[in-house]
Structure formats: C-alpha cells, structure tokens
Amino acid sequence: MSPILTARDVTKTFGVQPALRGVDLDLHEGEIVAVRGRSGCGKSTLLHCLSGIIRPDGGQVHFRGERLDDTGEAHRSELRRTRFGVLLQHGHLVAELTAAENVALPLLLGGGSRRAALAAAATWLGRLGVAEAAEQIPGRLSGGQSQRVALARAMVTQPEVLFADEPTGALDSLAGELVMQLLTRVAREQGTAVVVVTHDATIAAYAERELVLRDGAVDPTGLGVAVGTGA
C-alpha cells in the first residue's frame, strides 16, 4: 500500500541553527507514528513541516501524491481545515467561544451551516466524554476536558491525517493516558493516520512505530531519547 504522506530529505534552519537535517518519513493510512527525541531535536519543527504550518527549506513533502512544500499558504490552510487535523499541546481553544462552538469552528469556516456544525460538535463531544462541557467556555474547563475538546475539534472534519504535538504534555499521567486512549480509538475507527510528537515513552507506546530524532536527523539507533526532558 502506498503511503498517504511522505517526507523526503526535509531540512529546516532557523537563523544559523539547523532544526531538521534531511528527515525522511512514510505514513500509511490508519497508522500511528510517534516522533520522539530530546528537547530541541526538531520534533515539533518536523510536525509543522508535515502539516504545512511552515515550509521546509529543502526536501519535499507529499500528501496523496500532491506536493505540499511548494504550495501557497491558502491551500495549506485549507488542507488543515478539511483533510488534516491539528492537535496542539495546550489545545489553543478560542477563549470567547463555548466548547461546542470551538469544535464546530472548522466546519463553520468551511462554509457549513451553524446548525449542522453544532450537531456534529455535540456528537464528537459525546464520543469523547465531555458532552456536559458543551456550553462552557475554555476558562471553565479542566486540562483534561480542554484537551478532549481540542481533540474533538481536530477530528470533527474526519481528517485523513491527524497531527498531535505533545497532546498530553500539560496533563497529569492519568488524564494523558485517557486522551491517548480516546485519540487512538477514534483514529482507528475512521482510518485516520496519526503523527504524534512526544517525549514520553508511555504515550509513544500507543503508536505502531517510532521515529527518533537526534539533533535534527533520524537516529537509527533509537538512543536519542531521554524520557522527561520536555518537548
């Protein structure tokens, strides 16, 4: 089976500091891949390049045969709104919107009706066990609730690829494992491919395989990991 997403020889430099030095990755439909490594090794930068948040300086990124790294920001933003889901460490919910409105936002931005978008949001909040939070604003949610709301928002469009950047980093171990159980369950139910950035071996254990980075490059030994060192 051909990979759904590929990266070849991806490089990225910030100032004079190389963040990525020729990274390759193949991601298949329904597969969960954990990207691990020490703080500053390039994990988040790789995820941002794969999801089109930033453009790499070199190399190529393809999604279903379409080259992404040389396309415009408008098209990459559209992909993140329709075919990609992005789950960040602190959720980044819109403070002025209710949980239901936050989840519905990608559908509303895509031109969907408010009624249909809120109905879909209610369904996902229920699936993830936070239906009671639908009318609450983010400031009234616990950390675990916020991450589940953010996961619902990332999944409401039924994305083909989910990018999760330290999705449990702000949570205690119990809440973090619950979020990962929910993430892996809903991803597998609908065949979503997942790239999850983490420094935590417990979280990485939910993936089928790991990509370990060290100083911006793939570490073939897998020894460039130090659990608990941060993102």
Image (spheres, rainbow, N blue to C red):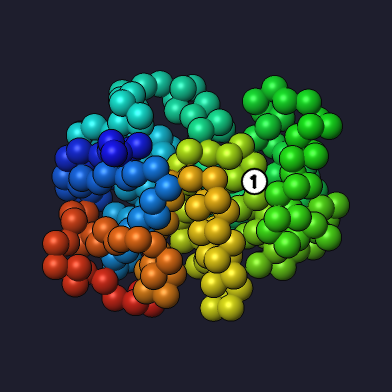
> Residue 193 placed where, x, y %?
43, 46
Indicate whether 230 appears above or below 107. below
- Up-down: is 209 above or below 31? below
Check disc 1 and report the residue beneath it: 153
- Secondary structure of residue under mark 1: helix
Quarter the N terminus occupies: top left
Q: Is residue 125 left or right of residue 207?
A: right
Q: For the C terminus, which image quadrant?
A: bottom left
- As drawn, the residue found furthest toward the front would be 1
Q: Residues within 10 Å of mark 1 (few under 14, many from 20)?
A: many
Q: Foreground residue, 95 or 182? A: 182
From the top left corner, tell me how far across and down residue 141 is, in percent.
75, 63
* Residue 81 at x, y percent in the picture: 56, 32
Q: In the image, what residue type sits under mark 1?
A: Arg
- Residue 82: in sight, yes or no? yes
Q: Residue at x 38, y 51 (%)?
A: 31
Comparing 211 with 30, the one in front is 30
185 above or below 5?
A: below
Position of residue 108 measured from the top left corner of the image (x, y, whole percent):
71, 30
Q: Residue at x 65, y 50 (%)?
A: 152
Q: Residue at x 26, y 58 (%)?
A: 211
Work out whether residue 170 can be spotted: no
Residue at x-position 66% and y-position 67%: 144
Report the side of 20 relative to 97 (left or right): left
Total labels drawn? 1
